[in-house]
Amino acid sequence: MQKVLSKFKTLKGQRKKMTNIFLKKLELKYKLMILVAGASLIGIIIISLTNYYLMHSVIFQQTKNQLQYVKERKTAQIHNYIQETKNNTISLSNNRYIQDMLMVFQGAILAIGTAGNEDTVYSQGYMNIFKNHHERIDKLARVNKLSGITFVSQTGQVIYTNTDTDSITSNDLLGRNLLKGQLQGTPLSTCFQKGKASLQFLDFNYIKVLDRVVSMFCMPIHSEFARVEEGIEAGEAIGVLITEVDQFYINKIVSEHWTAYNETSYIIGQDGLLRTSINGRNISSTLNNSFKNNHKIVNELSSSLNSSLAANNNETKTFHDDLKGEYIASFSLFEPMENISWFMVTEASHSIVFKEVTNINLIIFIITSIILIIMALIGIWIGKIFSVPIINVANLLEKRSSELNSLSKMLTDMSNQLSQSAAEQASSTTESVAAMNQMEAMVAQSNDFAHNSQKSTKDVKEKTEEGNKIMAQLSSSMDLIRQNNTQLQNISHIINDITKKTNIINEIVFNTKILSFNASIEAARAGQHGRGFAVVAEEVSRLATTSGNAAQEIQDLLENSKRQVEDIVKNTASVIVEGHEVAVKALNIFKEIAMQISDINEHIRGIVQAGMEELDGIKKTSIALHQLDRTAQNNSKVSSDTLTYANQLKDLNNKVHAAMNSLETIILGDNSIKKIKDNGQQHYIKL
């Protein structure tokens, strides 16, 4: 613990020493150089790291997409090839030529008496048939993309195959029995037995007797027609067709490079064994060696392949292997045939994928170094530019500091004089404020009297205006009476007209009486026949008399009414004239009174307004005097504060002097400056 504390104290002391050197010993231009270079370095590092991670992310995503695309395309090709091989096997099993060839080769073996036994079948007759048909059967295998075609009899003996070499070796398949001997119990034997009933697929397996890995389809062959000589009926099983998957074709598909990353693709079964060979990236493993030596892929990738997540999803991850280094792998599970699961894996080396990023980082490092050198030179140049003016400013401040000292003394003397003057000013201001308050009270009282007079004048004016309105109404009433008198005159005219009409009625009555009288005379002359007419005439005469009396009465009434109306019109006219003259005179008098009252009101309003303005001016003057009083008091306080500030200014001058020394130390360093005096003034020079 003590050692740790001691080491910590040592580091702390070294850090303090370095800080002291940086702050005090170095010149400003070197400090600026370090700061500019450091800031540039930090910015470049941030930009470089950001650029690196962005490029790394983009390239990784691009690589991921490309690897997934390559993996999916190759998976689809292999899946299609397996399905195509299956379909071709079914097609070949139904091919009549294949059926005939199976019977021909089976007959050749029967001819030499080795049927069912693992004996050689290379008789002269068999070889002649082999030579005649081998090329065509081999062509069928190539056309159908098969590594080999094999015929097996119902007893399990291989009667033809094009998978062997031309030389006779112990690894040949021809002549062997799949139900006996060394092939008994092998996956090939199992495929044959199940293939006698229906199509079977044999996943890649190592056959020790053959010393190689094979993957095959086993398909029963039925005779299309009856073969009487051989005792075979139509549709009867005559053997088994075994077609071998071309592993070299599959290897060719997965070994093609489709990207610039020189990717490596291969297939792994769920058992961890390869289904294709691996060639590339410091590793080489063949399909045959993987099965023969039971060499399983065991690494980070195989762990991911065996996980349930990898078994159900496409994955692209980065892995590390001691042999291969760091690499990116994309893998997914697919089924070439039912119940057969393979993993398609496509890998790319991390160093190849990110080679461009590495090159770019190298270029950025070179550019960064150049920029740092340039920024360091710029820092020195900037420091040199700024240090000279700052030194001049320091000399100027040093010169001004003595002037500030003199000014502080003058300021002290002036503050004393200002304090005395402020006291005298405060006394005079107090007296002026008292006189102004008295004047303000008197003006306020006069203003109240003017307001009261204005109010009384306003009341008189309102009463006068009210009387003026009444006289105006009286004049209107006189006009209305005049109009009514005119209407009475019209009534008199109407009565005259009625009188005229009444005279007409009287004339009609008179004429009616005459006619009635004449009718009575004529009725009397008529005697008995005119008696009824006489009665009518008498009645008409009576009605005429009654009408005449009524008309006379109406005429009398109209005469009386006419005389009364004429008297009323005459009296009313004289009264209207007199009343109108009186109303006009009264109205004119009220108008003159109203005008005079308005003039008086205007004069009083002017007096009130002037009084208010005078009172407002006095108030403002009073306020100004109060402010002047406060100002005088403040001046007294300011003079006292000024004296204090003068002393503080002197102290500040000393502090400025000390700060200038520190500034010079910062600019030129502690050991790089020297003070000299010129005419009593201090200056700084660089050593």
Image (spheres, rainbow, N blue to C red):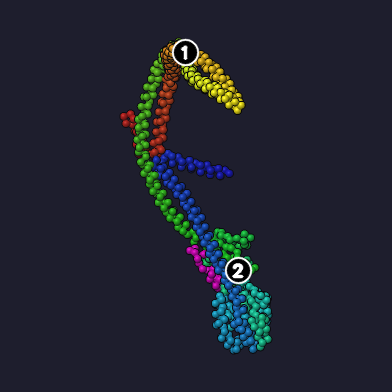
Q: Give the alpha-carbon distance from disc 2 to disc 1, as whole Å.
A: 142 Å
Query: What are the residue bounds of the magenta stretch?
Result: 248-263
Residue at 53 percent of width and 15 percent of height: 556
Residue 357 belongs to magenta span:
no
Question: Disc 2 or disc 1, which is closer to the eye?
Answer: 1
Tell me the kind of residue under disc 1.
Lys
| Residue closer to the observer: 418 or 133 | 133
**The residue under label 2 is which amino acid type?**
Pro
Residue 256: image x %, image y %?
A: 51, 68
Residue 204: in sight, yes or no? Answer: yes
Residue 325 in view, yes or no: no
The residue that disc 2 covers is 336
Measured along the vertical axis of the image, is residue 79 above or below residue 457?
Answer: below
Viewer-proximal residue among 633 and 506: 506
Residue located beneath label 1 in the image: 570
Residue found 43% across the figure and 13% down from its top: 588
